Image: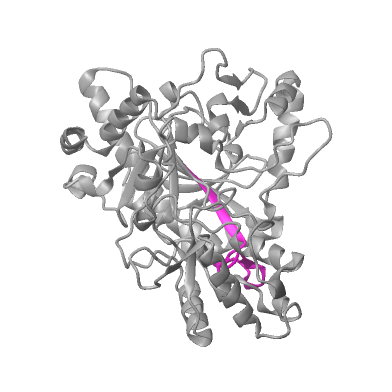
Amino acid sequence: MQKAKRLLLDVIKQHGIGIGLLVLHQRGLVTGHILRTDPANPLEIRNDPGDNYVYARVPVRDDRDDHAKLVARGIMNDSPDPNRLIYHEDGLVGTFSFDLQEIQGLCTALQPQDVVADLLTCLEAQGLLKEAALDSWQVQFKDVRARDRIRKDCEKYSQRVFVRTAKEFDHLTISLPVPYDQPKIRDILKTALMYKQPCNYCGVRELNPLEDITSTSLVPDWKQRYGFSMSRSYEFGFTFAPFGEPDAVCHFVAWDNPSIGEVVNNQDLQAYSFGDLVRLTCAVNKDIETYCATAEIPFIPFSGVCNHWAGNSIYHQHYQFFRIPNLPLTCAQVAKDLLVHHHPGLEVQRMSWPTPAYRIVMNPPVDVSKLSDLADKVAVTWRDLSRPTERIQIGNEIKIENHTQNTIVTQNDPGVVEAYFVPRLRRKLDAAPRPGVPTKTNLGVMEVAGYLLIDSPTDWEIIANLSPADRNAFGKRALEDVAPDDARIMQLEGALRPKL
């Protein structure tokens, strides 16, 4: 393993991060970490000449939620070392995890915070919780507001903080003292502990032992090689739930890799989020294009996307890269040139698409830093228009903005970089269900790009038997359902013009 790591580092130093990722991809296919499609159950993609959208059924995705299968294949660790896992504020359990007013009338003999202390001590004794130190390297806060709230709560009530253990939690069978053994108390515990877990990305080496990991920090001459710098370091790994046939699509993920003690602040859009996706995509493609030119083989560029919480449930900036040429959105016509930036050849265009979508494009020669800065400016403008009254509470005092976005970066034409920004609302992530069409309603970044992933075999059969006209109608209505209201979009376009 150490020899393989040294050889990979040599590849990255010589050819860059993009070729290093391709090497890791081939290794993943050989080891079986990246699961090929079963020949008896082949990949299906519906894209008839009359279709405006692509419908994809990728059977290997069926195993991504089957923990037993993933453990059997060695992808997931059945016994991770709890001391090597990292927790963020959403994984902590304490007084701040409960609605004390809800407990007030259930156990009148004690203060509600004391009831919580008793309950957590009881669960600790049963091996379901273990105490955590807020200043431990295992606890890394992402949000200063949540951090301050949790610390203040602990000081106010002089109470401890816990994290969940790997022991299975069943709120119906746990032992509780007689005063607390009530159905309502059990439901409160279930709600408080349901989603408490370590960070899948910070703990990836322990949770996914076959995950191939590399990092932008392994490129010692990054700025000299690519001509631009990154906002921070990123780690790359692979996934067993790809967007298409793994041999062809080569789907991998990246997440930000902050230093211990660094404030991450990533449940809200950061000023560097969209721009770093542009930078990473351009870096990967530059390496691969250079290699292909030397080897005299065809170059097919990679695309990069990010959900930014639209249909995704993780905190880190989380990017996905894949090779699927000509996503439908990228082939759509331009509805209007919204803005012309002061830098020659750099434009923002409104696309002709069922939900508002904007293309930020720069003609050759591309200045990646300027394109990235403009992409960030567009995204931050949308963020800043978010209404404070619409902030969404998701537990442990963590609140997120209603305004979110999907971002896409492509290089369909040689030398041209296109960045797509799709404004979204977290309260409108789902399309409306309709009789006679598939049950799939959640639309993430691939769906808004016109590449609809259909995981249900039943849904796929329905889609396959629709006429192209009916499929087009289904896709169009679904995209229209998640569009922000016209007034917000007009406000966005009005706010952008004076800034650019």
Where is residue 101 shown, x and y percent of the image?
70, 79
Q: Is residue 17 above or below residue 229?
A: above
x 26%, y 32%: residue: 19
Q: Is residue 175 above or below residue 375?
A: below
Specify whether residue 400 is painted magenta: yes
Specify whether residue 236 is painted magenta: no
Q: How is the image coloured?
A: one colour
**Left or right for 383, reference 186:** left
Comparing 102 with 392, the one in front is 102
Q: Quadrant of the N terminus?
A: top left
Residue farthest to the top, as pictured = 40
Residue 420 in sight from this viewpoint = no
How many marks overall? Answer: 0
Comparing 65 with 367, the one in front is 65
Range shown magenta:
384-408
Where is residue 354 shown, x and y percent of the image?
67, 41
Q: Is residue 20 above or below residue 246?
A: below
x 49%, y 83%: residue: 152
Where is residue 241 shown, x and y percent of the image?
50, 34
Which of the 4 image quarters holds residue 434? top right
Where is residue 343 shown, x and y percent of the image?
37, 52
x 66%, y 58%: residue: 171
